[in-house]
Image (cartoon, rainbow, N blue to C red):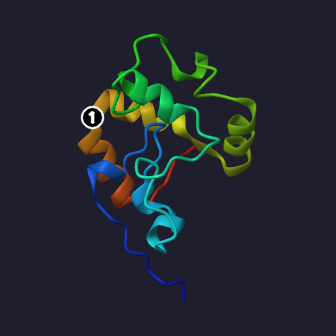
Amino acid sequence: MKKEIDITKDENLIAYCGLYCGACPRFVKGKCNGCKENNPSWCKVKPCNLENNYTSCADCKQFDSVSDCKIFNPLLIRFGEFVSRTSRKAGIQLIKDKGRIEFENYMVENKLVSIKK
């Protein structure tokens, strides 16, 4: 039987890129404090959001779609999303359409780090 994981509900666990850190296995196991607490050197999205005072890429007005942003959408990330059949873009769109609280509720209820394609 698969063990039920405890998903943390906290608006601060909404990552800048449309992921939900509260459902991430690394966060749940205590191995990570979430994207907003950590400073991964490979992440270019967080510095862009901080420079522009955004809470997430959903606040960006520079592009009609995050798909057009080279910072948000590098090749390696696109490959990872293809393999995992997930979409950070869908997360950003949900934040734009419904707001951060509805995004958080959806991710917690469905135990998702990223929205499935």
Q: Tell me, yes or no, if residue 100 can be seen here.
A: yes
Compared with 28, 42 (above or below) is: above
Compared with 74, 19 (above or below) is: below
Compared with 63, 11 (above or below) is: below
Kind of residue indicated by mark 1: Gly
Locate the N terminus and report the quarter of the image it occupies. Answer: bottom right
Provide residue 100's location: percent of width, then percent of height: 28, 39
Provide residue 60's location: percent of width, then percent of height: 41, 19
What residue is shown at x 68% (from left), y 38% (from top)? 77
What residue is shown at x 41% (from left), y 52% (from top)? 37
What residue is shown at x 34% (from left), y 60% (from top)? 109
Q: Tell me, yes or no, if residue 57 can be seen here.
A: no
* Label 1 crowd (10 A; few <14 / some 14-19 / many >=20): few
Q: Nearer the viewer, residue 53 or 95?
A: 53
Provide residue 49's location: percent of width, then percent of height: 43, 28
Q: Is residue 85 toward the left or the right of residue 38 in the image?
A: right
Q: How many marks?
A: 1
Compared with 4, 89 (above or below) is: above
Locate the C terminus and report the quarter of the image it occupies. Answer: top right
Q: Which residue is mark 1?
A: 99
Please, what secondary structure does the residue beneath circle 1 have? Answer: loop
Provide residue 32's location: percent of width, then percent of height: 49, 63
